[in-house]
């Protein structure tokens, strides 16, 4: 079985599995993005989150923030209000932390040049401790201030998802036109040389060829980084 056929089999197998996330389904704000990627033969998504505001309780003996060992006091993929956070904080027994997490998208790619279209990064997050050993360490006024910031980040995150979707769609359309107008033997030669050359480069410099060069103004119209995409290349020994 050739590598393309093997990747298709792997993709079909992964996409047929049950969604094991807490929500059990794809977030509304990234449905179109996930469908765009899964509709292309060279990609498929393994997990995603459109962005969320969460309140975690690490517990009294917690020394590191590890979500799988935390109590989830509150989680929302929409803007939240102070009253919901205050009520949730009353359940905290340890160190409660308010967090905003931006878009997360894990994508499997058939080969290196496919991954180059997707690779971007982000630092658009928020993480603030609110309680210690169950005792509230900040005022309600400060909590309200933090919620406003988190909600602003949520709105900005949604705009970034839309910009990323539009830029990715443009890049994929351009790639399709290029592939259909290029002689097959030239495409094969180009793919092979691209893989060999890119493999030697710094991964950060090799990222996001289409996004950063073609659509830089669209994606970087502010001083922030853009949504982070985790990209995995189809393994040689799968």
Image: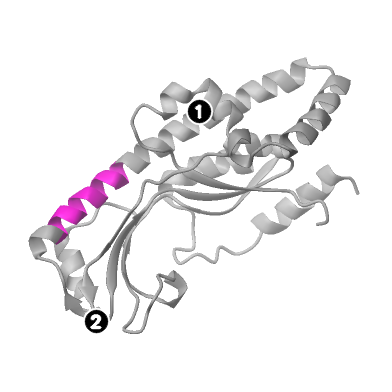
State left or right for residue 81 relative to residue 113.
left
Residue 76: name its quadrant. bottom left
Seen from the viewer's position, the closer of residues 139 and 2 is: 139
Q: Is residue 115 visible from the viewing direction of this image?
A: yes
Q: Which mark is residue 167?
A: 1
Residue 211: name its quadrant. top right
Q: How far from the left and from the top, in percent, is residue 38?
A: 62, 44
Q: Is residue 39 visible from the viewing direction of this image?
A: no
Q: Which mark is residue 68?
A: none
User: For the image shown, how many numbered marks are present on the structure?
Assistant: 2
Q: Quadrant of the C terminus?
A: bottom right
Residue 23: name its quadrant. bottom left
Q: How far from the left and from the top, in percent, is residue 215?
A: 49, 23
Crowd class of label 2 (few under 14; some 14 to 19; many from 20; radius 10 Å): some
Magenta stretch: give its range. 143-155
**Is residue 14 placed above or below 189 in the rendered structure?**
below
Foreground: disc 2 or disc 1: 2
Task: Tell me the CA gap for discs 2 and 1.
Answer: 46 Å
**Is residue 10 placed above or below 215 in the rendered structure?**
below
Magenta-drawn stretch contains 184:
no
Residue most toward the right? 1
């Amino acid at each position: 079985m050739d590598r393309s056929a093997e990747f298709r089999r792997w993709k079909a197998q992964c996409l047929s599995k049950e969604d094991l996330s807490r929500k059990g389904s794809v977030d509304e704000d990234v449905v179109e993005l996930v469908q765009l990627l899964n509709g292309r033969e060279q990609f498929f998504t393994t997990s995603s989150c459109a962005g969320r505001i969460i309140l975690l309780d690490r517990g009294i003996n917690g020394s590191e923030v590890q979500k799988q060992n935390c109590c989830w006091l509150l989680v929302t993929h929409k803007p939240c209000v102070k009253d919901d956070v205050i009520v949730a904080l009353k359940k905290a027994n340890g160190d409660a932390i308010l967090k905003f997490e931006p878009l997360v998208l894990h994508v499997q790619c058939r080969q290196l040049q496919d991954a180059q279209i997707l690779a971007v990064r982000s630092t658009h997050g928020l993480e603030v401790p609110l309680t210690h050993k169950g005792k509230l360490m900040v005022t309600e006024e400060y909590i309200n201030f933090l919620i406003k910031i988190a909600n602003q980040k949520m709105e900005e995150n949604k705009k970034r998802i839309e910009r990323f979707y539009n830029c990715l769609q443009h890049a994929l359309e351009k790639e399709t036109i290029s592939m259909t107008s290029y002689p097959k033997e030239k495409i094969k030669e180009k793919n092979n040389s691209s893989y060999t050359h890119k493999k030697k480069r710094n991964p950060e410099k090799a990222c996001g060829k289409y996004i950063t060069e073609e659509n830089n103004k669209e994606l970087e119209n502010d001083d922030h980084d853009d949504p982070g995409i985790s990209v995995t290349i189809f393994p040689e020994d799968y």
